[in-house]
């Protein structure tokens, strides 16, 4: 459990954030730039001393201003991957990677040197110097350096933000692999929702230095305020399911979601794999009658739970699909034409191809 | 005059080099400390210390030499203490010439080192902190290597300037042939002596060449180190 309650005044900016997140797991600190994510992360690392508050990791207090307790950063064993990598320019990649390992000989190792080098593909980079590396390589080295410092918590402060799309895609799989391989809890700072979707288990939503809401990612994907941060086009319910059947030749799979079955586009998954997908609200269609002769692969019997106006002149409909909650964005005209009301029975239509790129494996199957 | 003209030049050159090397060796650790304190530490009186460190830049060198004489002269309290406790005599010795040179070149050295310390990315020190490096460890393993260009530049510049220190040396250490008669002092002496024009010219050319070499070496070294650091 990571319990954080931090008050810090920085000029005009006031950080007043409190959250409690389960460990192990990946805790996403999500919010726009300037929302206080980095200050909060620095407070957890011990690089910033809060004006008041307390930080406790798995029952051990790290900061407690009331009791004048402040464990120095070098004694916290909290690994930190900075946005700008911060590799030491006077050391080789090997020297960088070994830096923390040498200083924490007495702590229990998280992962061995050889395994980190193999997992992050660093073998050919070891003799090089930081300025010879690409942005993506730098972040991988920084990650290895933090992991080998034997941390009990890993902070990742927008590790992909300074990379272009191709480099981001180069590093993300490594992060996913680490999450699945290691039991170390992580705090992942981001303002990219797709990174949260692929990595996080718990989401803390920050805005203007305050925690707007926090909870499991599925639950938070339904949170109305999220829309103002990620924009209307990225809003959509996050649901989890288990792969029941795969068709490798067509790249499609069937998922058990709630009590129903969902056809999705998914390559390389095995039956039994746990999968998370986001159904973008703008891609979900509602029908009041059964439909025929459509190419849509999913037509699911469901019930309208609630309808709200969104900030963009449309309506956001929350429907219950056999126990899973799905969001659909429809125009106000459609809402009037269908005379939708909470409690109505509707058919929820989802194109299987619309799930491509929004479906991620959480745990491999058999 | 003392010996043949050839040996006078060589002797002055050797003495100048010895004085400059000893002065740099003596003042370098202190200059690093002073640069660190002036850049990083926040305490009342920091401005005063800053001004004090830079004082030799604006004071007449003779005044600096005179103050040293008042402090470390044979009968001065510090000088007497050093002699009785450690058998060290500074006034009128090569060591004294080195001390006077060190004081005069100290601000140059501190300036160069300070500039490089200000350029050290504090973020790298933070990264070292999260990796388990305690303050002193951090300074030695991260800050100091990153300051290396400034330390080298400061040392070589102070060395080159130290070869030519005149006023403070002649006041504090006097003009003793073979002991404190460095290049500029030998040059001055030659100029004062009838028939010393040729020697004076040779010594002037030597000083000129040495200074130029020193500055070029400083620039070369700094570039090498910067490239090594990937700057």
Image (tube, coloured by chain):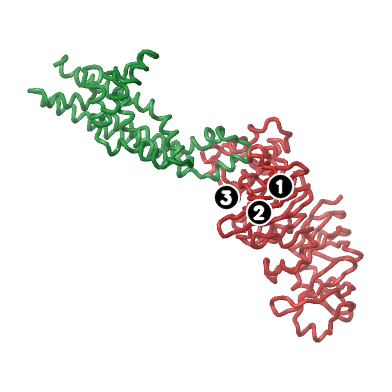
Chain colours: A red, B green
**Front position in the image: A35 or A338:** A35
Q: Which residue is mark 1?
A: A55
**Nearest to viewer (mark 3 / mark 1):** 1
Q: Earlier in the sequence, mark 3 or mark 1?
A: 1
Left or right of residue A116: residue A25: right
Q: Which residue is mark 3?
A: A84
Residue A131 pos. (x, y %): 52, 44
Q: Residues within 10 Å of mark 2 (few under 14, many from 20)?
A: many
Q: Residue at x 23, y 29 (%)?
A: B166
- Secondary structure at badge 3 equals loop
Q: Chain of mark 3?
A: A
Q: Which mark is residue A7?
A: 2
Q: Is residue B149 above or below residue B173?
A: below
- Secondary structure at badge 2 equals strand
Q: Earlier in the sequence, mark 2 or mark 1?
A: 2
Q: Residue at x 34, y 20 (%)?
A: B77
Q: CA distance from mark 3 to mark 1?
A: 25 Å
Q: Is residue B103 above or below residue A50?
A: above
Q: CA distance from mark 2 to mark 3?
A: 26 Å
Q: Residue at x 27, y 21 (%)?
A: B15
């Amino acid at each position: 459990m990571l319990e954080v309650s931090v008050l810090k005044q920085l000029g005009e900016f006031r950080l007043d954030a409190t959250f409690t997140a389960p460990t192990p797991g990946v805790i996403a600190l999500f919010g726009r730039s300037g929302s206080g994510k980095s200050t909060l992360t620095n407070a957890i690392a011990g690089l910033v001393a809060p004006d008041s508050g307390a930080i406790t990791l798995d029952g051990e207090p790290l900061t407690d201003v009331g009791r004048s307790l402040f464990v120095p950063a070098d004694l916290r064993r909290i690994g930190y991957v900075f946005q700008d990598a911060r590799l030491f320019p006077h050391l080789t990649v090997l020297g960088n990677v070994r830096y923390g390992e040498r200083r924490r000989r007495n702590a229990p190792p998280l992962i061995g040197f050889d395994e980190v080098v193999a997992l992050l593909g660093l073998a050919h980079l070891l003799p090089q110097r930081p300025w010879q590396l690409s942005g993506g390589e730098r972040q991988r080295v920084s990650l290895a350096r933090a992991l080998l410092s034997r941390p009990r918590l890993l902070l990742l402060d927008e590790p992909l933000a300074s990379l272009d799309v191709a480099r981001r895609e180069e590093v993300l799989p490594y992060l996913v692999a680490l999450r699945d391989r290691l039991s170390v809890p992580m705090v992942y700072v981001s303002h990219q929702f797709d990174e949260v979707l692929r990595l996080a288990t718990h989401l803390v939503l920050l805005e203007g230095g305050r925690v707007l809401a926090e909870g499991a990612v599925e639950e938070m994907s339904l949170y109305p305020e999220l829309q103002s941060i990620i924009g209307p086009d990225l809003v959509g319910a996050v649901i989890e399911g288990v792969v029941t059947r795969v068709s490798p030749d067509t790249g499609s799979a069937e998922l058990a979601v709630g009590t129903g079955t969902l056809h999705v586009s998914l390559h390389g998954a095995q039956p039994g794999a746990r999968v998370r997908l986001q159904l973008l609200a703008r891609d979900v269609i509602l029908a009041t009658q059964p439909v025929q002769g459509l190419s849509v692969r999913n037509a699911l019997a469901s019930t309208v739970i609630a309808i709200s106006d969104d900030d963009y002149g449309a309506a956001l409909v929350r429907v219950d699909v056999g126990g899973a909650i799905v969001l659909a964005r429809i125009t106000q005209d459609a809402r009037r034409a269908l005379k939708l009301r909470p409690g109505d029975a509707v058919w929820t239509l989802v194109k299987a191809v619309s799930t491509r790129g929004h479906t991620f494996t959480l745990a491999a199957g058999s | 005059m003392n010996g043949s003209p050839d040996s006078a030049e060589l002797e002055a050159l050797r003495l100048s080099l010895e004085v400059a090397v000893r002065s740099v060796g003596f003042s370098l650790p202190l200059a690093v400390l002073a640069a660190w304190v002036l850049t990083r530490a926040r305490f009342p009186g920091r401005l005063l210390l800053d001004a004090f460190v830079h004082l030799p830049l604006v004071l007449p060198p003779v005044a600096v030499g005179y103050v040293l004489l008042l402090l470390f002269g044979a009968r001065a309290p510090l000088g007497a203490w050093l002699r009785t406790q450690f058998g060290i005599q500074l006034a009128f010795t090569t060591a004294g010439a080195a001390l006077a040179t060190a004081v005069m070149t100290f601000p140059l050295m501190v300036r160069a080192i300070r500039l490089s310390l200000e350029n050290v990315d504090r973020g790298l020190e933070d990264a070292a902190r999260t990796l388990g490096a305690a303050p002193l460890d951090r300074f030695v393993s991260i800050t100091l290597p990153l300051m290396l260009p400034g330390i080298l530049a400061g040392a070589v510049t102070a060395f080159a300037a130290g070869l030519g220190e005149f006023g403070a040396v002649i006041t504090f250490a006097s003009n003793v042939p073979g002991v404190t008669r460095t290049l500029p002092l030998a040059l001055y002496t030659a100029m004062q002596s009838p028939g010393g024009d040729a020697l004076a010219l040779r010594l002037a050319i030597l000083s000129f060449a040495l200074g130029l070499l020193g500055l070029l070496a400083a620039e070369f070294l700094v570039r090498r180190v910067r490239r090594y650091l990937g700057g």
